[in-house]
């Protein structure tokens, strides 16, 4: 089970039954939510756009093989059918949809270490391993992995790269980082030094900022504790063949104003 596969088609990876960090985060909401998402998996426009941006920025050589870029047109009629026939198995992308990707790519390549990481890394790796504690088969799709730097890299789009630290925890990226690094260690026997995220804003001027998490830092141990808990929950649900549990029938009291809440003053109304 412990293996790394290069150039595995995304749909093949997605169909593999091993558990991903996204599965675990869905399970973290509640088992019923995980079950619903698993049984009603939809390749949304947002997911497709995200993959297109990743391919354009990280794998320019593959972009023209997988995408056909055309001027915007009505998605109906004979002209559209002709374009679809010309595209074949390629995804159709309008030129204006590429503007954000181009802006992000240009700004990212102004970061000296981004270009170095691209050149010294394997891209879009599919990693499969068996968790040693639960025996559950796990999988990860890693943007960039460099054995030269002994680092994992991930590209994230964001609304605000300065406030990205809040998004890091809100979206469970600490769980992803721990899960991915442990997966690489399980397969290769080498502990990655860390996980580096390139956060790029989706709107002009496409500001971007790097965020580094060392394997010894607290967010990694926290993320590991969380994903290990979720793997045990998954194992429990699987052994009972029951993922129907939702929220407990109890009220949750809201007692305190969170420290991140910015209270409005009268002048701001």
Image (cartoon, helix red, strand yellow):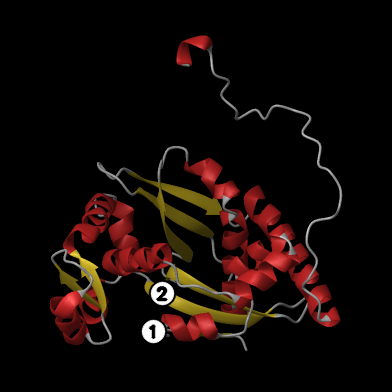
Badges 1 and 2: C-beta atoms under 8 Å apart?
A: yes
Where on the picture, by quarter, is residue 93?
A: bottom left
Is there any visible trace of residue 5 in the rendered image? no
- Residue 172 location (% of width, % of height): 60, 54
> Measured along the vertical axis of the image, is residue 239 above or below residue 220?
below
- Residue 166 location (% of width, % of height): 55, 41
Sooner in the amino-acid sequence: mark 1 or mark 2: 1
Is 269 situated left or right of 190 in this image? left
Distance Cα–Cα, label 1 vs label 2: 7 Å
The residue pinned by badge 1 equals: 7
Task: Give the SS element for disc 2.
Answer: strand
> Measured along the vertical axis of the image, is residue 36 above or below residue 86?
above
The residue pinned by badge 2 equals: 124
- Residue 46 location (% of width, % of height): 41, 62
Q: Residue furthest front?
A: 77
Task: Give the SS element for disc 1.
Answer: loop
> Measured along the vertical axis of the image, is residue 169 above or below residue 259?
below
Residue at 33% in and 55% down: 113
Is 82 situated left or right of 122 in this image? left
Residue at 79% in and 30% down: 255
Q: Nearer the viewer, residue 4 or 200?
A: 200
> Measured along the vertical axis of the image, is residue 45 above or below residue 209?
below
Residue at 19% in and 82% down: 81
């Amino acid at each position: 089970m412990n293996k790394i596969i290069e150039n595995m088609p995304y749909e093949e990876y997605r169909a593999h039954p091993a558990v991903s960090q996204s599965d675990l985060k869905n399970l973290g909401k509640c088992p019923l939510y995980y079950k619903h998402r698993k049984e009603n998996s939809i390749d949304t426009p947002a997911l497709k756009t995200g993959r297109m941006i990743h391919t354009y920025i990280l794998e320019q050589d593959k972009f023209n093989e997988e995408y056909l870029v055309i001027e915007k047109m009505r998605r109906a009629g004979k002209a559209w059918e002709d374009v679809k026939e010309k595209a074949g198995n390629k995804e159709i992308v309008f030129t204006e949809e590429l503007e954000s990707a181009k802006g992000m790519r240009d700004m990212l390549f102004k970061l000296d270490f981004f270009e170095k990481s691209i050149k010294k890394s394997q891209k879009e790796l599919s990693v499969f391993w068996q968790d040693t504690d639960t025996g559950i088969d796990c999988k990860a799709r890693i943007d960039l992995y460099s054995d030269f730097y002994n680092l994992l890299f991930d590209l994230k789009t964001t609304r605000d790269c300065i406030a990205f630290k809040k998004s890091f925890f809100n979206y469970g990226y600490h769980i992803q980082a721990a899960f991915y690094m442990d997966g690489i260690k399980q397969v290769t026997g080498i502990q990655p030094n860390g996980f580096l995220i390139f956060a790029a804003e989706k709107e002009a001027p496409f500001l971007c900022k790097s965020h580094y998490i060392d394997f010894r830092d607290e967010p990694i141990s926290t993320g590991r504790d969380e994903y290990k808990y979720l793997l045990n929950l998954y194992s429990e649900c699987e052994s009972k063949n029951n993922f129907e549990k939702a929220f407990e029938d109890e009220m949750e009291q809201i007692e305190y104003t969170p420290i991140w809440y910015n209270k409005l003053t009268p002048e701001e109304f």
